Amino acid sequence: MLDKVVQAAETLNGLLTVAKFLDEAQRKKAEEILAECASEANFKVNEELFGKGNSLPESECGKEPNVNNKTANTWQQHLGNLKHAAAFICVQERLAAEFPNNFAVEPRYRRDELTNELLLTDKWLNSQRPDVVLHFTRNATRIQCIYDFKFPCDSADRHNPLANMKTEAQLRKYRSLGNEDCLPAVVTPSLGVSRPSSL
C-alpha cells in the first residue's frame, strides 16, 4: 500500500513539473549560468591556445589560423567555433543539473507554411537555429527565451554587442519564433546577457 502511495505522489509530482515555464528567479539563474559558461569557454580556449593569461592580438583576428584541425579560415571564426563548442558543453552540464526539461541547445525551428505552427526540423531551408532556448517543460516549440553566444575575437572587447547591425537582424528573426514577453538576448564573455530594449 505504501508503495502505491509513493508511486502516486511521484506521478503527481511529475505532472506538476510537466507544464510550466521557468519563473523569474529560475530564468535569472539560467541566465547566470549562460554568462558563466560564456566567460569560462572564452578563458579556457584562450588559455589552451595562447597560454595562461594570454589571448589573440586583435591584429591577428582576420588572419588564417596556423593550427592543426582548424575549423574556419580566420582566427576570429575559428576561435568563435571552439568557444561555442566549449560553452555548449558547459550549458548542457549546468542547465541539465538545474532545469533538465526546460532548455535546448541549438534546436532548429521552422514555421509550417499552412498553419504557421512552430516546428522542430532538421532542414536548413527557411529555418533558424538559436544557440540556447529556454522553453515550456518538455516542449521545445513553446519558447520562453532565446539566447545567442557572441565571442569577440578581442577578449578585452567590452563594446555593446547589440550595436552590430547583423546581430540586431539576427535577434529580430529570433523574435518571430518566441515569446513576446522575453526579447532574444546576446551572451558575451565580458558583458554577460545583453537584451535590447525593443526589436
Image (cartoon, grey):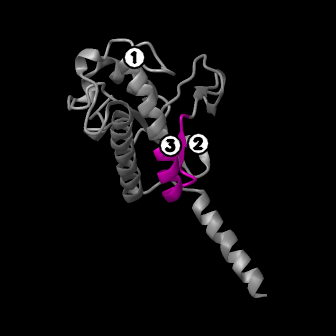
Q: Which residues are magenta?
A: 90-106
Q: Residue at x 59, y 26 (%)?
A: 110
Provide the residue designation for mark 3. 89
Decide which of tag 2 and tag 3 comes sooner along the chain.
3
Q: Could you classify mark 1 by the number of other residues whose Cα lies within 10 Å: few (under 14), some (14-19), or many (20 or more)?
A: some
Q: Could you classify mark 3 by the number of other residues whose Cα lies within 10 Å: few (under 14), some (14-19), or many (20 or more)?
A: some
Q: Amino acid at mark 2?
A: Ala
Q: Amino acid at mark 1?
A: Pro
Q: Horizontally, is 133 left or right of 165 in the view?
A: right
Q: Residue furthest bottom?
A: 1
Labelled pair 3, 1 in contact (Cβ < 8 Å) = no
Q: Amino acid at mark 3?
A: Ile
Which SS class for mark 3? helix
Query: Count the marks: how many?
Result: 3
Give the mark toward the camera: 2 or 3: 3
Quadrant of the image for the C terminus?
top left
Q: Horizontally, is 46 left or right of 6 in the view?
A: left
Task: Tell me the quarter of the picture where residue 120 sits.
Answer: top right
Provide the residue designation for mark 1. 65
Task: Tell me the quarter of the picture where residue 59 sits.
Answer: top left
On whether residue 104 falls in the magenta region, the answer is yes
Q: Is residue 39 above or below residue 65?
A: below
Give the mark toward the camera: 3 or 1: 1
Label 2 and label 1: CA atoms lie apart by: 37 Å
Q: Give the percent coordinates (x, y) of residue 53.
A: 25, 38
Provide the residue designation for mark 2. 140
Labelled pair 2, 1 in contact (Cβ < 8 Å) = no
Q: Give the percent coordinates (x, y) of residue 108.
A: 58, 30
Quadrant of the image for the N terminus?
bottom right
